Amino acid sequence: MSAANPPSDLLLPVRADLAGLEPYGAPQLRVKACLNVNENPYAPSDEVVEDIAASVREAAGTLNRYPDRDFPQLRQALADYLEVESGVRREPETLWAANGSNEIMVQLLQAFGGPGRTVVSFAPTYSMYHGYARDTNTRWVQGARGEDFELDLQVVQRVMREERPSVVLLASPNNPTGTALPVEVQMKVLDLARTTGPQEDGRVCASLVVIDEAYSEFRREGVPSALELLAGNPHLVVTRTMSKAFGMAGLRLGYMSASREVLDAVMLVRLPYHLSALTQAAALAALRHANELMAQVASLRAERDALVTWLGDQGLRTAPSDANFVLFGTFEDREAVFRGLLERGVLIRVVGPQGWLRVSVGTPEEMELFRNSLLEVIR
């Protein structure tokens, strides 16, 4: 029998902890209103598309060479953008980018997690955090948030002191709830984390605290970024993405800001030339149009706030949201509500605690369809 047609009883040596698991992925369906994966609903303008195309075309002429593995131009552009967006100036040497914030998280756990190490988070939160831990052979421990979806500092303190995590993953705004971490809570967690890490050579390490700000540009007026806390906290990492507010989900560009000690560790585990020349060129072009791409953020915030008010008027509960989505409920049969909306061309997400659903903020036309469809389903 040829190697191309092995016997049907041939067993492959897949890892035992992966047996029977399903890969991550939200449904991708052709519907009138795709409101399930928290994308920016507005496509880039012709001007942005033309700039990206021209930049990629220029980069394509050098594809016989490896890309710049340290991408200083992109890091400078990201630093300039963050200064405008958050008011915090970070040196380019303290920024790092990868293929989506997913790869950033995996790199961090490759460097600071691994066998014999523990990563902690608090549910409900982003389901892929568990996957990052699994993929890097890092032990996963999940504490619980309060009924209001806020962090309970007593629970956080107990879990961190008992588990001695090398990494703590916290999303702000949190997914799927949309809740942001108050700055005083972030500061208390950072203070606690100074002495809750594993022991190395008889010394107690800090826990690396990763605050995932994938939706940070959508935060409400007066809500600060965790970037403000990086100075004086070398065990803090703040991650961002161009997938959400920038409307560049297809670009796959995530980035982080952290101390140089953290970046030095990540350099050891990154794949060689992990960020392609085409990705770098496209990201730089998009950043040149940051003002235009960010112009839709204000309208999406307003649409979100109007949606929260409307859902409340219908007698439904919502979680306070600083993101571009709203968690709402509660329903005795949320699957039935989901199916009813889908039958009407509206795709949302079944996620979070039992009884809750999550809807991304779309265009005014998409939100009108969602509201009309939801009324038909629940009445």
Image (cartoon, helix red, strand yellow):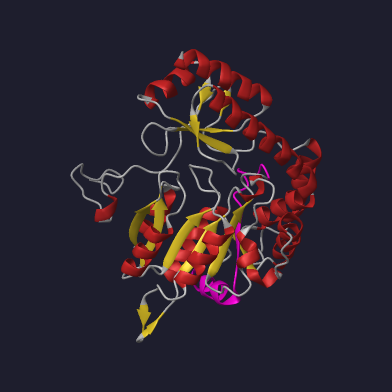
Residue 270 in view: no
Indicate yes or no whether the magenta region holds residue 269. Answer: yes
Instruction: Give the quarter of the figure containing the N terminus.
Output: top left
Where's residue 311, x and y in %? 55, 26
Q: Identify which residue is drawn at 74% across, 43% down.
A: 293
Q: Nearer the viewer, residue 198 or 332?
A: 332
Indicate yes or no whether the magenta region holds residue 134. Answer: no
Where's residue 199, x and y in %? 36, 79
Q: Identify which residue is drawn at 38% across, 68% down.
A: 165
- 280 left or right of 290 in image: left
Q: Nearer the viewer, residue 133 or 216?
A: 216
Residue 45 in view: yes
Residue reaching furthest right?
47
Residue reaching furthest left?
9
The span shown in magenta is 246-271
Q: Identify which residue is drawn at 70% across, 51% down.
A: 282
Where's residue 143, x and y in %? 36, 55
Where's residue 362, x and y in %? 63, 30
Number of residue marks: 0
- 308 left or right of 161 in image: right
Q: Identify which residue is drawn at 64% across, 57% down.
A: 225
Q: Nearer the viewer, residue 101 or 314?
A: 314
- 209 left or right of 255 in image: left
Q: Nearer the viewer, residue 29 or 322?
A: 322
Q: Is residue 315 above or below residue 160?
A: above
